[in-house]
Image (tube, helix red, strand yellow):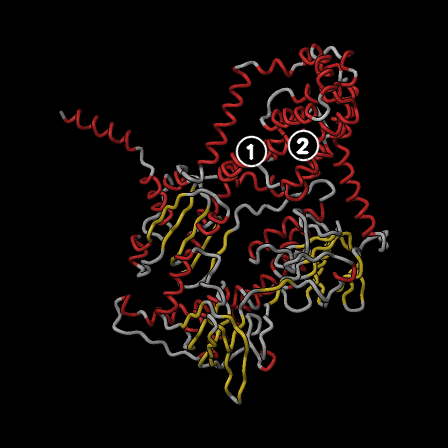
Amino acid sequence: MKKMLPRIILMLVISILAYAFYAYDLRQYLTLEYLKSQQQSFATFYAAHKISAPAGYVGIYILVAALSLPGATVMTLAGGALFGFKLGTVLVSFASTIGATLAFLVSRFLLRDFVQKRFGDKLQAINRGIEKDGSFYLFSLRLVPIFPFFVINLAMGLTPIKTLSFYLVSQFGMLAGTFVYVNAGTQLGKIESLEDILSPGLLLSFALLGIFPLIAKKAMEIIKARKIFSRFTKPKKFDYNLIVIGGGSAGLVTSYIAATVRARVALIEKHKMGGDCLNTGCVPSKALIRSAKIISYANRAKDFGFKSGRFEFDFSELMERVQNIIKKVEPHDSADRYKKLGVDVIEGEAKVISPFEIQVNDKIFTTRNIVIATGARPFVPPIKGIEQIKYLTSDNVWEIRKRPERMVVLGGGPIGCELTQVFSRVGIKVTQVEMMPRIMGREDPEVSDMIKQKFESEGIRVLTGHRAKEIIVEGDRKALICDHDGEEIHLEFDEILIAVGRVANTRGFGLEDIGVEISKNGTIETDEMLRTNFSNIFCAGDVAGPYQFTHTAAHQAWYASVNALFGKFKSFKVDYRVIPWATFTDPEVARVGLNETEAKEKNIEYEVTRYGIDDLDRAIADSEDHGLVKVLTPPGKDKILGVTIVGAHAGDIISEYILAMKQGLGLNKILGTIHIYPTMAEANRYAAGEWKKAHAPEKVLQWIGNYHSWMRG
């Protein structure tokens, strides 16, 4: 209530002033007729009061503009009639801009939070556009007096545009209209109506003036593009319509789509087809997770009715199984398969020597368009002493065949958590180190706590709030020194696995030489169509960001390929509205859309509906009765803002919510859908039922209860 009090007071003040304006018919003093009738009196007053008259005029003008009252046009005419063209222009320019800015601030203070919370998901594109080009749009609108300025003031207050930008753009943008009206005011006797000021020809001129900034912006883009390309010679003929650099998920899908639409496409890969996902990421990690899961079942034998359970296994054989799984999946991403699809697969290291030329080995290929899909690599922080050891990353950990006794996993993100648990389950004493206050920091605290408790129950030592400082080597002894609240913690290890994130591969193949722009976070700078600053060079996958998932790489690949091949006719902005992901720990953690942490950060109002999977029949039957489904919805509505699922097969169960969010379906639709019994997917329907129960129409149900009572007599 205390937060609302200033808004309530301001609303009351505005309401009182607006009521007084209309109740006492103050509008009559802001008409052309009144101005003309009192012109001589005003002139006499100004002659006697050279300072107070302009000051009073400015104050009244600011009040009229700030309250969005009708009469700003007449006030502008009065400026010219009373003070002449020069002084009138100065007074009107500052008064109108200050008043407009006050109206802007009032709108922002009273309404922006409400509007952004209520319609934030629908306004994301507008917000991004305003943040990027808001000044251009505002300047164009200010140049055209046909647009009601008070509407512009109020609408802009609801957007993220900065106050200073609004003021400065308004100050200069309204000058053209100010000149016309103030000049007209100096000839007040000749004006019979406001229509006399703006002739159709003048309106057309303003309209053309209004689109000038947008035309200028487009012209600047063309000039900039030509300047970028001016250093390079464009071939008269091209070997390919599209060359793709990188044979991971993004590159494979891009090539496949291009070949499908009969474009001539080449795919260049320097190492292994399939990229990280096949060779060092998704496939090997999930293969080892599966083996470790079987071992965990043996350790839980009593949960399934067995007296004991024990598997004899050889660590090296488990790691060899991983390689066998990779080989089994390999044909899906092989060069032979893509050659049969119509893709020219070229093995070698690519070097971009111009926006139209790619060198591979000693041969140069020409192309109309390029898609960069070079992926990312593990980030290794500059820890003192790390150069003394052969550390492990997600790239080379699959090469080890001798099981270490002790392992330190540095990193508490998805990769770090998955590998922490999997190596613990195959018999390694694992210590996980995370510098932040909790592991899985992108998830809600309760989710992080659930995974941490599971890890610790399996014998994993989880150290959060520990910052890696140094690695020391003394003979056969290796140790990581961490800082924890000023205290040095020594962690001895046989192997250390660095899993603190990934960095995009943008260097070493010519992008920096031709001038492709790199963003602050290390990815390649692209627009919403995935174009770089070169209009024929596109990006997809980890190298483009903002998500580093195989499925988003494939998603981006469609936009990159279609925009590259058909962008002259139609371009498509990448749709990031519904991006799901899962961390394949046990239990799995899957999420789509907002969680509570993000909703609070973005000031989005929400309700939480929880369903405990410990109540689900199939989970109980499988002895997997743990975890939850957590759904965020707007207050009182069944629209799904986001879902987090923790539990067995969470990555599969969440698919129903992904579809629902993508197609705009709410919890009522999920509740009304038949789900097979007994399945884990029933958790979705029960969660929807929990929401329905919390929003039951109690008054209606009370009347129905009375009706049934009456029917019983």
Inspect the image, locate mark 1, and give the three-letter code of the amino acid beneath it.
Val
Q: Is residue 561 visible?
A: no
Relative to residue 275, is residue 19 drawn left or right?
left
361 lies left or right of 462: right
Q: Which secondary structure, mark 1?
A: helix
Q: Which residue is mark 1?
A: 106
Q: Determine the residue positioned at 81% across, 52% down.
A: 228
Residue to which mark 2 is pinned: 97
Residue 307 drawn at (x, y percent): 25, 73
Q: Eyeballing the image, is 584 above or below 214?
A: below
Quadrant where the N terminus is found in the figure? top left
- Give the x, y percent position of residue 17: 53, 23
Residue at the spot 80% in from the left edge and 58% down from the top edge: 354
Tags 2 and 1 in contact by the CB under 8 Å rule?
no
Viewer-side residue, 276 vs 309: 276
> Considering only vertical position in the picture, is 432 above or below 662?
below
Residue lying furthest front? 48
Amino acid type of the residue that numbered disc 2 sits on in the rendered structure: Thr
Foreground residue, 485 or 379? 485
Mark 2, Cα crowd under 10 Å, few <14 / some 14-19 / many 20+, is many
Name the residue at 55% across, 77% down. Answer: 470
Residue ID at (51%, 43%): 662
Foreground residue among 701 and 7:
7
Q: Is residue 531 left or right of residue 546?
A: right
Number of marks in the image? 2
| Vertical relation: 693 (above or below) 79 | below
Screen quadrant of the C terminus: top left
Which quadrant of the structure image shows residue 153? top right
The residue nearer to you, when weighing 68 against 477, is 68
First in residue order: circle 2 vs circle 1: 2
